[in-house]
Image (tube, helix red, strand yellow):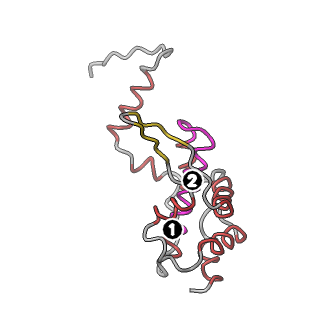
Amino acid sequence: MSARVLVERLDAVPGIGPTTAQIIVAEIGADMSRFPTPEHQASWTELCPRTIQSGAKHTTGPAGQGNPRLKGAPGEAANAAARTDTFLGARYRRIVKRRGHARALAAVARSILIIAWHLINDPDASCQELGADWHRHHLDSARKTRDLVRQLQAPGHQAALTPTAA
């Protein structure tokens, strides 16, 4: 597949513009045989979570340096996608509440790289927007109830949690 076609396909992803798509294609290339899975590509770019283990202790660490030219392009695209009313924008808003701005951008950048891997690897694949409300419709209702009860039980909250008889 030609680079021009790949750039056009990547340009359809929210947050990715023509310049960012050109950078991604230039750094990754059209041959995806060196990355058997999208996780391998994310690891090569150093956009994957890192766990440091020493004995029984597990801590998180910085993602690392990776390929600076490739790591910057999805980062800029993630920053642009975070401001949109799309699936990636909703993903950013969900993560930023509990993890912070930088980690939310890194998570969205990783998602963009995984989308790019699928678009480059499969000539028949196309980018299909899931919508900003995808998470709301696909969350487990029992989990959502449990999370809301936990928020109400948090220290400093004044609401009483007594079950009401119906």
Quarter of the rendering occupied by the C terminus: top left
Q: Using the rendered view, name the quadrant where residue 8 is placed.
A: bottom right
* Label 1 element class: loop
Numbered label attached to residue 120: none
Amino acid type, label 1: Gln
**Nearer the viewer's eye, disc 1 or disc 2?**
2
Magenta segment, which residues? Answer: 96-116
Q: Where is residue 32 shown, x and y percent of the image?
A: 50, 76
Magenta: predominant secondary structure element? helix
The crowd level at tag 2 (other Cα within 10 Å; few <14, some 14-19, many 20+) is many
Task: Name the residue nearer the viewer: 98 or 163.
Answer: 98
Q: Residue at 38% of width from left, 37% of height from top?
A: 144
Q: Where is residue 121 shown, x and y percent of the image?
A: 49, 76
Q: Where is residue 65 shown, x and y percent of the image?
A: 62, 54
The residue that mark 1 highlights is 128
Q: Residue at 40% of width from left, 33% of height from top?
A: 57
Lateral position of residue 46 relative to residue 7, left or right: left
Task: Name the residue nearer the viewer: 78 or 60.
Answer: 60
Q: Residue at 66% of width from left, 70% of height from top?
A: 21
* Label 2 element class: helix
Q: Residue at 33% of width from left, 15% of height from top?
A: 162
Point out the residue furthest to the right here.
19
Amino acid type, label 2: Val
Taking the magenta stretch, the answer to whether it contains residue 103 is yes
Task: Name the residue nearer the viewer: 126 or 165.
Answer: 126
Quarter of the rendering occupied by the N terminus: bottom right
Above or below: residue 32 compared with residue 104: below
The residue that mark 2 highlights is 108
Point out the residue furthest to the front here.
55
Q: Where is residue 77 shown, x and y percent of the image?
A: 66, 59
Point out the residue furthest to the left here.
165
- Closer to the chain start, of discs 1 and 2, is 2
